[in-house]
Amino acid sequence: MSTLYIVATPIGNLEDISERARKVLSEVSYIACEDTRTSGVLLNHLGIEAQTFSFHAHNEHQKVEHVLNILDARQHVAIISDAGMPGISDPGFLAVRAAHKAGHTVSVIPGPDAATTALVASGLPCDKYVYEGFLPQKKGRQKQLKQLVDEERSIILYESPYRLKKLLGELRKYMGDHRMAAVCRELTKKFEEVVRGSLKHVSDTFELRDEIKGEIVVVIAPKSYSE
Ligand code: SAM
């Protein structure tokens, strides 16, 4: 029986790789990587010389067939993304679905993801949350923002540093100055930072900066939450 492994990898700090992830990646015949060069750095660091192939948003449909062929040939394959958990705003879901349907075993090796790391770091309620990933950049963006206004769970959004100021402005416009939020930047990395407070405070803080760098998760508190 062959297995499709979905392996979480670090979101910044390479020491966050798990022992199990290391073991699985060193034992599989093939590793499907979102970007073979990016993952090459991690695999080099781990001393792993497995065969890799690219598996990204633009070739995912076609490469799922390749993954199934490997599994049909009774060989194990792992999927890793550039960072964190495959399938979470990254390729993975299609292959997992296809492997289940074809009767193969799927095994997820848990580990870091930016969403739950940010949620906990935010100091906002963690008991109920909704993961929205990246909002659409154009069509449907305003509609989705409006739908989130009355949300009574913490909301997790991914955003690029170039669009952070715009996003915070929009959140303020729809949700008001007083809604609590946190911007979690460069988690697990050298310049890790959490800017937390009212949307007014968080937005004003970033408006004062000329350049915003790094990877960002925005967490917004439930509508009725106050402190
Ligand atoms: N699969 C990943 C996961 O498990 O979180 C997410 C991949 S998604 C393409 C990349 C986005 O995740 C970034 O734009 C950023 O919003 C978030 N992200 C990834 N690493 C991060 C980090 N170290 N700090 C903050 N946000 C991060």
Image: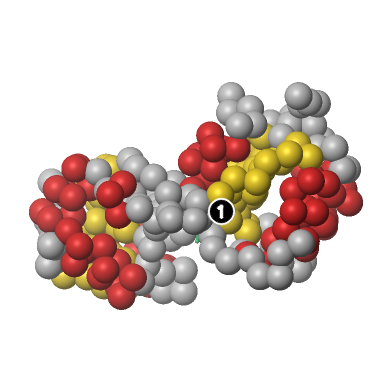
Asked if the beta carbon under badge 1 is closer than 8 A to the nearest atom of ligand 1, the reply is: yes
SS under mark 1? strand
Left or right of residue 124: residue 38: left
- Residue drawn at x 79%, y 32% is 223
| Quarter of image, res 19 | top left
Name the spot of residue 82 as percent of width and height, x first: 38, 63
- Residue drawn at x 43%, y 60% is 91
Q: Amino acid at mark 1?
A: Arg
- Residue drawn at x 18%, y 50% is 22
Compared with 63, 226 (above or below) is above
Q: Which one is nearer the viewer's eye here, 33 or 203?
A: 203
| Quarter of image, res 74 | bottom left
Q: Which one is nearer the viewer's eye here, 86 or 202?
A: 202
Name the spot of residue 125 as percent of width and height, x first: 63, 27
Residue 158 seen in render? yes
Name the spot of residue 101 as percent of width and height, x first: 34, 48
Residue 97 seen in render? no
| Coloring basis for residues | secondary structure
Left or right of residue 126: residue 54: left
Compared with 15, 30 (above or below) is below
Q: How many marks?
A: 1
Q: Which one is nearer the viewer's eye here, 97 or 181?
A: 181
Name the spot of residue 75 as percent of width and height, x first: 13, 57
Q: Quadrant of the C terminus?
A: top right
Left or right of residue 1: residue 193: right
Residue under label 1: 185
Within 10 Å of the Cα at label 1, are there few (<14), some (14-19), or many (20+) other Cα atoms? Answer: many
- Residue drawn at x 33%, y 41% is 110
